[in-house]
Image (cartoon, rainbow, N blue to C red):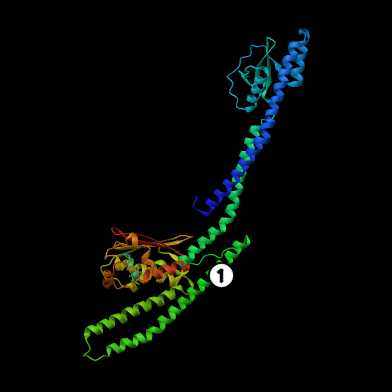
């Protein structure tokens, strides 16, 4: 999380905001909240003291009136001395301030304790002129608990600060994320969706530049395909002429040399044919109704595997799909050809399923498998596992590269699962 731009930026912004908040609260606490709180505590302590002294000095018959007056107008209560007091743990510093003031003024230790069963009411015993009076007051009497207000404020502000920074950072990193995804698509040879050229000026400009670059890359790729197709096509004629000339060489020319030349021409012909097929698969192409069963049977016919090769076809007979017919033919041909080539002559299963959303075709062989470390590489042009196998199987290493290009161009998906003991299974999803 802290590695992503989102994580880092939100961490920096929210911690800065929190630090700022803490600083504000500390300063406000020290210079405003604390002095006001102390002042309040002082006032209440003074009132209690004054009341106690006045009470003592009053003639006994007027004392009750005084007590009534105190409780109605000042919310101070006269204790009888038999109130059960609880252990006092003061969570609010206010009580400590009061205790301090009272102790200082009376010159002896004074405790404020809550009443058992009514933790709202607090009592304090005041010793005046050898008499002890117990005076009580309610929590509300100490007014707004400023430390609590500060705590609530900090919590609410902190939550707001974190949320707003998250929203802010998300707004900035979202387009960057989209840009990085689109760049990845280009990197793997695909065509990304056009980015929205909106938001802040810098981001909009970046998106615009990226879209332009993406269009250029696409153009370049299309030109490359046309160029490759053209060159391949034009090379065929001189190659045919070379082959004819080779056949017509006099008998005294070394046979080994002739074979070597013939093999080389053969290889070039294969490569050229594949390039042309690549461009064919990548051309715009038309969407046609294709019956998978019929298509797969046709392809097997073209590949013409040996008589004892078993190929099981399992799928809905009405496996009709509307798709790019030429491209699908090319793709399945290459995959089935590989299964036959590298399947060690063991049975091959071709299964398919068609639903409203997708059509999936799976080709599984029980052959040599593709080791994990080669599974990405085999999709690169001319990549073949173990060069020693090349001569027996005689491919050029373009088959899967062509499949990969077609799959990306058509927005299909290919998933490969393969290991050396069970063989290879490739699923194409349209
Ligand atoms: P071609 O251009 O004629 O298809 P190729 O078959 O060698 O030549 P790819 O189809 O691109 O080229 O395959 C690349 C490599 O991947 C192959 O050489 C082979 O080593 C490996 N490979 C492909 N399919 C399979 C498979 N079904 N089982 C085992 N290995 C495979
Ligand atoms: Mg192949």
On screen, residue 191 above or below 6: below
Most foreground residue, 119 or 242: 119
Q: Position of residue 132 (x, y in %)?
A: 67, 11
Q: Quadrant of the C terminus?
A: bottom left
Direction bottom: furthest residue:
250
Asked whether mark 1 lies closer than 8 Å to ligand 1, one says no
Please indicate, yes or no, whether residue 279 appears anywhere in the rendered image: yes
| Residue 284 in sight from this viewpoint | no
| Left or right: 204 in relation to 372 | right
Q: Residue 10 at x, y = what percent? A: 56, 50
- Residue 51 quadrant: top right
Between 158 and 106, which is closer to the camera in this rendering? 106
Q: Residue at x 56, y 49 (%)?
A: 12
Pick the front one: 426 or 419: 419
Residue 297 found in image quarter: bottom left
Say which quarter of the image contains residue 84.
Answer: top right
Q: State the residue at coordinates (56%, 56%).
A: 174
- In the image, taking residue 347 as reference, residue 50 lies left or right, namely right
Q: Secondary structure at mark 1?
A: helix
Q: Which residue occupies 22% across, 83% down? A: 256
Can you identify the residue that label 1 sits on?
Answer: 212
Is disc 1 surrounded by few (<14), some (14 to 19) or many (20+) residues within 10 Å? Answer: few
Indicate the position of residue 188 as horizontal and vertical percent values. 45, 65
């Amino acid at each position: 999380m802290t590695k992503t731009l989102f994580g880092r930026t939100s961490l920096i912004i929210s911690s800065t905001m929190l630090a700022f908040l803490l600083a504000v609260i500390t300063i406000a606490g020290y210079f405003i909240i604390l002095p006001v709180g102390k002042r309040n505590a002082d006032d209440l302590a003074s009132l209690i003291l004054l009341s106690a002294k006045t009470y003592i000095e009053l003639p006994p018959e007027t004392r009750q009136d005084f007590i009534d007056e105190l409780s109605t107008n000042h919310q101070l209560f006269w204790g009888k001395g038999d109130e059960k007091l609880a252990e006092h743990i003061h969570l609010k510093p206010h009580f400590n301030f009061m205790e301090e003031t009272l102790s200082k003024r009376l010159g002896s230790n004074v405790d404020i304790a809550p009443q058992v069963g009514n933790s709202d009411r607090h009592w304090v015993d005041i010793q005046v002129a050898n008499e002890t009076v117990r005076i009580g007051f309610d929590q509300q009497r100490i007014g707004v608990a400023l430390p609590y207000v500060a705590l609530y404020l900090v919590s609410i502000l902190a939550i707001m600060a974190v949320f707003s920074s998250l929203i802010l950072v998300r707004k900035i990193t979202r387009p960057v994320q989209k840009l990085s995804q689109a760049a990845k698509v280009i990197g793997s040879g695909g065509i990304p969706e056009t980015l929205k050229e909106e938001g802040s000026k810098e981001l909009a400009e970046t998106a615009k530049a990226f879209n332009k670059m993406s269009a250029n890359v696409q153009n370049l790729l299309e030109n490359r395909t046309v160029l490759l197709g053209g060159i391949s096509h034009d090379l065929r004629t001189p190659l045919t002429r070379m082959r004819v000339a080779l056949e017509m060489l006099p008998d005294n020319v070394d046979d080994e040399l002739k074979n070597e030349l013939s093999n080389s021409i053969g290889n070039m012909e294969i490569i050229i044919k594949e390039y042309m097929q690549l461009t064919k698969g990548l051309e715009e192409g038309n969407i046609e109704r294709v019956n998978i069963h019929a298509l797969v049977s046709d392809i097997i016919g073209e590949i013409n595997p040996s008589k004892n090769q078993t190929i099981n076809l399992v799928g809905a007979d009405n496996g009709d799909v509307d798709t790019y017919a030429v491209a699908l033919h090319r793709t399945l041909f290459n995959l089935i050809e590989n299964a036959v080539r590298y399947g060690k002559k063991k049975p091959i299963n071709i299964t398919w399923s068609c639903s409203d959303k997708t059509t999936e075709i799976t080709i599984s062989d029980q052959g040599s498998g593709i080791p994990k470390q080669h599974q990405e590489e085999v999709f690169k042009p001319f990549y073949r596992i173990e060069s020693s196998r090349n001569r027996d199987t005689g491919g050029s290493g373009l088959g899967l590269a062509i499949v990969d290009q077609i799959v990306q161009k058509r927005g299909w998906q290919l998933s490969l699962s393969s290991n050396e003991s069970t063989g290879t299974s490739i699923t194409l999803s349209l």
